[in-house]
Image: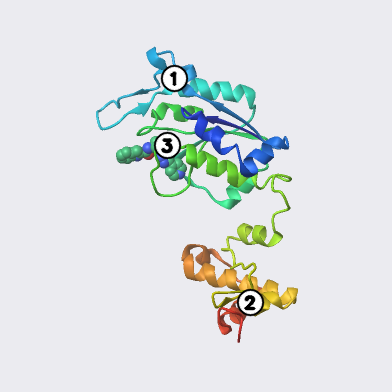
Amino acid sequence: MRFDVISIFPELIEGYFQAGILARGRERGLLALQVWNPRDFSLLPHRRVDDRPFGGGPGMLMQAPPLVAAIAAAREQNPGAPVAYLSPQGRPLRQADCERFSKRSGMILLAGRYEGVDERIMAAVDEEWSLGDYVLAGGELAALVLMEATARLLPGVLGHAASAQEDSFAAENLLDCPHYTRPESWQGAVVPAVLLSGDHARIARWRRGQALLRTRARRPDLWAQRVLTAEDVRCLQEAESEDEFGRV
Ligand code: 9WO
């Protein structure tokens, strides 16, 4: 999969690709990245890309011409790739969206800066995504989040196959269950006995029950969408009847 990112801070994007799964995906030839700096497409003195808003108001806007020229250059190298703009006005990004992105051959991501971009760039944009209802200083972090969430779904990018359980919880809009590793007892806090039982069917039911309990308690929005299966009801009832260590 090929990502092209339009950003006046290419070093922020390149820097994050220097470690972790994005670096590994690139080394393995599963991911490609090119960053385009709109300043390289500016026809103004001092490679200027911003100006004051018509109608007045605080701050500066990114001008359309250098941004749209950078998008056109990226499109030539990444044919068929949708152009996505990251902004708080976009559609809320979800795991299911990243699953769809991971089946694309490429994406072009536009990271804005300043107080916004000239609205006329939207003619060159295919989709607009938001990570949540807060304002950042620019779209770079959001572009990195989208790329990491998508890249980890590409076959071969993760070191070991992602746990089937985590992926199934994510695909179902369930929160993850609690996890434990050694030491078995630490400062008086012990690991739930069920996880040490070796009974894999019981462990799977416990994990599912915990995921359901957590989702109900913490994410009423996800819970309201949920259609409980008979197995869900069983796991949930077991979880409700136990204490946090799996004791009845
Ligand atoms: C700045 C600003 C200042 C005063 C009042 C309102 C304001 N809005 C903005 C603003 O939206 N600035 C953006 C900065 C311009 C586009 C790129 N920037 C951005 C993207 N900030 N936050 C995001 C973002 C992207 C995806 N998901 C969440 C936030």
Rendered residue at 63%/27% (across/down): 78
Q: Residue at x 44, y 33 (%)?
A: 112
Mark 3 — residue? 138
Q: Nearer the viewer, mark 1 or mark 3?
A: 3
Q: CA distance from mark 1 to mark 2?
A: 57 Å
Q: Are marks 1 and 2 in contact (CB under 8 Å)?
A: no
Is disc 3 surrounded by few (<14), some (14 to 19) or many (20+) residues within 10 Å? some
Specify the label residue 65 is tagged with: 1
Q: 117 and 15: which one is in front?
A: 15
Q: Is residue 161 above or below residue 88?
A: below
- Label at residue 235: 2
- Residue for point 70% across, 76% down: 196
Question: Which residue lies most toward the bottom here?
Answer: 248
Res. 173 mark = none
- The amino acid pointed to by label 3 is Gly
Q: Residue furthest left?
A: 56
Q: Amino acid at mark 1?
A: Pro
Q: Is mark 3 within 8 Å of ligand 1?
A: yes
